[in-house]
Amino acid sequence: MQADVLEYYDQTVSSPSGSFYIPAVLRVPQLLQVVKRRRVKHCLSRKNILFRDGFSCQYCSSEDDLTIDHVIPASRGGKWEWENLVTACSRCNSRKGNKTLLQANMKLRKIPKVCDIACSA
Ligand SMILES: [Zn+2]
């Protein structure tokens, strides 16, 4: 039953003639959330992380030598996902190295979130 609704929603997006399905999905906010999340995750890329973070280091605001930093290092099981990736300049990235934020005594300027702006671009 649930899977059927998700399929309708997908069809609606790609075909204007199916737009009457949208109100049906909107009445089930939980399901819409699921669909949204999936779509956003699809767009996760280095470029979109930089875009989300305004092309500035999330530790010191520098805009030079930007890299992508794993908040929880990959060597400690940190995953390649929106909530665990931030833009960091190479200086901060190497300072943090394989440490956690706490161990490195570093703070993020903002908590990394799933970004849906980059997705519509
Ligand atoms: Zn920095």
Image (cartoon, grey):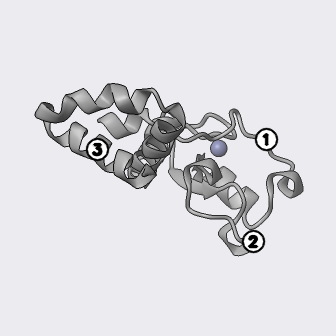
**Percent position (x, y) of residue 61?**
62, 34
What residue type is disc 1 on? Lys
Q: Residue furthest bottom?
A: 75
Question: How many C-alpha atoms fall within 10 Å of the one at disc 1: few (<14), some, or many (≥20)?
Answer: few
Q: Name the residue under label 3.
A: 8
Which secondary structure lies at badge 1? loop
Query: Residue 76, relative to residue 72: is it above or below?
Result: below
Asked if one can make out residue 44 in the rendered structure from this viewpoint, the answer is no
Asked if one can make out residue 40 in the rendered structure from this viewpoint, the answer is yes
What residue type is disc 3 on? Tyr
The quarter of the image holding the C terminus is top left
Residue 107 tag number: 1
N-terminal label among 2 and 1? 2
Question: How many C-alpha atoms fall within 10 Å of the one at disc 3: few (<14), some, or many (≥20)?
Answer: some
Tell me, yes or no, whether the two marked residues, 2 and 3, touch with CB atoms within 8 Å: no
**Percent position (x, y) of residue 96?**
74, 57
Q: Nearer the viewer, residue 5 or 46?
A: 5
What residue type is disc 2 on? Arg
Q: How far is mark 2 from mark 1, CA to CA? A: 18 Å
N-terminal label among 2 and 3? 3
Ligand 1 quadrant? top right
Q: Mark 2 points at which residue?
A: 76
